[in-house]
């Protein structure tokens, strides 16, 4: 069987060709890694090791596996994740009083809002 024909690189105006399934030529192959960011470090290098998993499990149990975010407005959504009330980048710690159980979707929205605030340079609560 003949080899699969190479197609153009996914980067606009790039003359490169590729046969890889991700669609990037060798010059732009690093763009295929998606969420991977080697400079960020692994989850364990960022402090989310076995001790964090143990602490998170205790916080979920303390909060009865129910979302504690203020956006839920009294709704009882099941929580599967733990988040910081004061984000670590704003000086928050892993103290149990700074942690709460949160639903996956609520966590995504909260994290997106925190990321946007961090990029804009606005102070907390603004």
Image: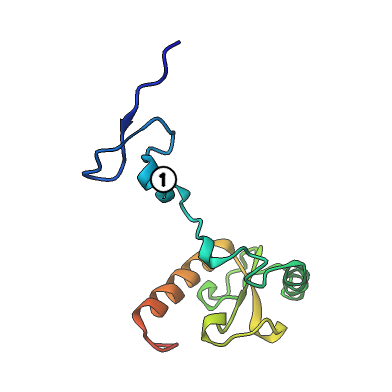
Q: Nearer the viewer, residue 40 or 111?
A: 40
- Vertically, is 120 above or below 48? below
Residue at screen point 78% across, 69% down? 54
Residue at screen point 45% across, 10% down? 1
Residue 59 appears left or right of 72 = right
Q: Residues within 10 Å of mark 1 (few under 14, many from 20)?
A: some
Residue 88 appears left or right of 16 = right
Picture quarter with the C terminus: bottom left
Residue at screen point 71% across, 67% down? 65
What x and y, as percent, mark residue 93?
Answer: 64, 84
Residue 1 appears left or right of 76 = left
- Vertically, is 123 above or below 27? below
Mark 1 lies on residue: 29
- Vertically, is 119 above or below 57? below
Number of numbered tags placed on the structure image: 1
Q: Residue furthest left?
A: 13
Q: Nearer the viewer, residue 19 or 117?
A: 19
- Vertically, is 22 above or below 81? above
Q: Nearer the viewer, residue 60 or 13?
A: 13
What x and y, as percent, mark residue 97?
Answer: 69, 86
**Residue 52 picture quarter:** bottom right
What x and y, as percent, mark residue 106?
Answer: 53, 67
What x and y, as percent, mark residue 24?
Answer: 37, 41
Q: Residue furthest top?
A: 1
Helix, strand or loop for disc 1: helix
**Residue 41 picture quarter:** bottom right
């Amino acid at each position: 069987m003949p080899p699969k024909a190479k197609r153009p690189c996914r980067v606009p105006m790039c003359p490169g060709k590729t046969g890889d399934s991700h669609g990037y030529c060798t010059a732009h192959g690093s763009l295929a890694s998606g969420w991977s960011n080697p400079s960020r470090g692994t989850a364990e290098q960022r402090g989310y090791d076995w001790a964090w998993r143990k602490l998170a499990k205790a916080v979920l149990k303390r909060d009865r596996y129910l979302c504690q975010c203020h956006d839920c407005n009294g709704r009882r959504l099941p929580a599967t994740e733990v988040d910081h009330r004061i984000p670590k980048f704003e000086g928050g710690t892993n103290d149990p009083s700074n942690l709460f159980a949160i639903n996956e979707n609520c966590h995504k929205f909260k994290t997106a809002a925190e990321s946007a605030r961090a990029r804009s340079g606005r102070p907390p609560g603004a």
